[in-house]
Image (cartoon, rainbow, N blue to C red):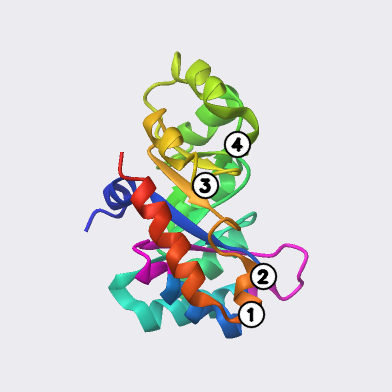
Amino acid sequence: MDLLALIKECKLVSIARKVPVSDILDAAKAVCEGGIRFLEITFDQADPLCIDKTTESIALVKEELKDRMYVGAGTVLTVEQARAAREAGADFALAPDTNVQVIKEMKNLGMVAVPGALTPTEIMTAWNAGADIVKLFPAGNFGLSYLKAIRGPISHVPLMAVGGVDENNVSSFLKGGFCSCGIGSNIMRNDLIAKGDFDQIRQIAARFVANSRC
């Protein structure tokens, strides 16, 4: 199974930020039933227990959904976090920044590495360090005109749009040259999770999937 090719084929990564361990399974099942096969569970850097909580969530989803859902870690800022995520079963890892040491560790651990970048220099630094996909972040703040300018000299690096991707613009990002999109609170809405309205999350995920079919 070529996970990198599958990310590009499925196109969407649902991002779970600050979702309690007690709710992560129901939330993961909802997006999975909506048709999304990739889930990123982020490290909350403000929480001193973030490694324990995130790795517990990763392990729970991996055990329950098995090959129905590929699970990754997000906001991976340190080598320690990358190692902890892999030990918990993470298939891939994302970061908001370009940290060569962390990128190399992701690859050494056998994970698909998706570090974050914004400028051409950061994109190429990440790519040359071994990134499989580079996360353009925050994509929504700069838009497709910025992507077009970058795509001129840097056409060979696969880019994932993260930040500001919603139901209405997801197709534009994908048609505009991104190989995939990561979506956080526009799918994994913490207000709906708090109310236990996982069916609404499933419906939102399904609409994203429908709109991503370019």
Residue 150, x across and y down, in percent: 51, 20
Q: Residue 130 carries which label?
A: none
The residue where tag 3 is placed is 103
- Marks 1 and 2 sit apart, C-alpha to C-alpha, by 6 Å
Mark 2 or mark 4, which is nearer the start of the sequence? 4
Pointers 1 and 2 in contact (C-beta within 8 Å) = yes
Residue at 43 percent across and 40 percent down: it is 130
Question: How many C-alpha atoms fall within 10 Å of the one at disc 1: few (<14), some, or many (≥20)?
Answer: few
Pointers 4 and 3 in contact (C-beta within 8 Å) = no
Residue 98 picture quarter: top right
Q: Which one is in front in this view, the residue at disc 4 or the one at disc 2?
A: 2
Task: Locate residue 12 relative to residue 125 in the image: left or right.
Answer: left
Q: Which one is in front in this view, the residue at disc 3 or the one at disc 1?
A: 1
The residue where tag 1 is placed is 195
Within the magenta stretch, is there residue 179? Answer: no
Residue 75 picture quarter: bottom right
Q: Give the total of numbered labels.
A: 4
Mark 1 or mark 3, which is nearer the start of the sequence? 3
Residue at 72 percent across and 62 percent down: it is 45
Residue at 57 percent across and 56 percent down: it is 184
Q: Residue 140 carries which label?
A: 4
Question: How many C-alpha atoms fall within 10 Å of the one at disc 3: few (<14), some, or many (≥20)?
Answer: many
Q: Which one is in front in this view, the residue at disc 2 or the one at disc 3?
A: 2
Q: Which one is in front in this view, the residue at disc 1 or the one at disc 4?
A: 1
Q: Which stretch is magenta? A: 31-51
Res. 201 visible in picture: yes
The residue where tag 2 is placed is 191
> Identity of the amino acid at label 2?
Asp
